Image (cartoon, rainbow, N blue to C red):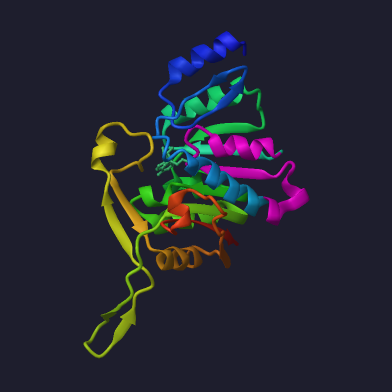
Amino acid sequence: MTPQEIQLGIEQYGPWFYPFEFGGGLRTTAIVPPSVTDIFDTRLRMVEGAVGNYFGQRERGLECLDIGCHEGFYSLAMARRGMLVTGLDAREENLGRARFVAKAMGIDRVEYRQGRVETLAADRNRQYPLTLFLGVLYHVEDPMLCLRQVAAVTGEMCLIETQVVDEIEGSTEWGSREWLRPYHGILALIDETGEFDAGGRETGVTPMATCPSPKALRFMLRQAGFRRIEQIPPHEGAYEQHARGKRVVYAAWK
Ligand SMILES: C[S@@+](CC[C@H](N)C(=O)[O-])C[C@H]1O[C@@H](n2cnc3c(N)ncnc32)[C@H](O)[C@@H]1O
């Protein structure tokens, strides 16, 4: 694409969620406030570190599925590392932007498909050695269904990034006042009707969101079929939510 075509695309597809650099002074400006844009690089560093540590030399040609890929920020990052990437998102309007960015950057190791995580296993019907599930879990209304679907298409390793709510420890009666069962974490129900009705491109496919506590996330990952789960520690200078443990990145292996 010529610089003029790229500039036109930047204008036509805007507003943008992510900051993309095309070279020659051509770039998109993210709509998120400057105080929040650090989140993109923090996630990237945490994800790339975990991927590099585990796959090492196998990264080149590795197949990766980026679930809830939005404008393709992390799909492109994986493609730049030599992977063959499929980006999947429920919103065609996000995928149109993602396709434009990949084309403008001349990256052809990535393809984008419309689809929902809720029906992933039937739609894809195959496994990818690496799956990314970043910034999506806390937007969906049925996190357990979604994690089962993600696990079904994961061949080896999945990286999950999500907001988490404060833990609530406790137990409940279970059949009799004498029988108690401990909580294995909690799910908070969050109303995203405002963003959803305003046409926000980041919410789930329904306005009801559920956000897990850390314990709930680990419990659900095990129930979904992941056998080993590790939390990726935030680095020095990480985005404030990651640094405070309000957002977490987990690596989960089948
Ligand atoms: C907050 S954004 C996160 C984007 C990106 N993964 C990241 O970490 O920056 C959530 C993305 O997931 C997509 N999404 C939400 N619910 C989905 C679902 N049920 N199935 C597929 N994609 C979904 C949205 O359209 C949006 O692009």
Q: Which residues are magenta?
A: 52-81
Q: Quadrant of the C terminus?
A: bottom right
Q: Quadrant of the N terminus?
A: top right
Q: Is residue 246 left or right of residue 173?
A: right
Residue 206 percent location from the top left of the image: 30, 43
Q: Nearer the viewer, residue 134 or 64?
A: 134
Which residue is rendered at x = 53% and y = 34% of the image? 72
Tell me which corner region of the image, top left, top right, bottom left or bottom right, holds residue 178.
bottom left
Tell me which corner region of the image, top left, top right, bottom left or bottom right, holds residue 111.
top right
> Can residue 127 be seen?
no
| Residue found farthest to the left | 177
Residue 64 percent location from the top left of the image: 62, 44
| Residue found farthest to the bottom | 178
Q: Is residue 29 left or right of residue 202?
A: right
Which residue is rendered at x = 65% and y = 36% of the image? 79
Q: How many marks?
A: 0
198 is higher (above) or lower (below) than 241: above
Residue 58 on the magenta segment:
yes
Residue 231 percent location from the top left of the image: 54, 62
Q: Quadrant of ligand 1?
A: top left
> Can residue 137 be seen?
yes
Which residue is rendered at x = 57% and y = 54% of the image? 235
Residue 31 percent location from the top left of the image: 40, 30
53 is higher (above) or lower (below) than 95: below
| Residue found farthest to the right | 57
Residue 42 on the magenta segment:
no
Q: Nearer the viewer, residue 6 or 62?
A: 6
Tell me which corner region of the image, top left, top right, bottom left or bottom right, holds residue 198.
top left
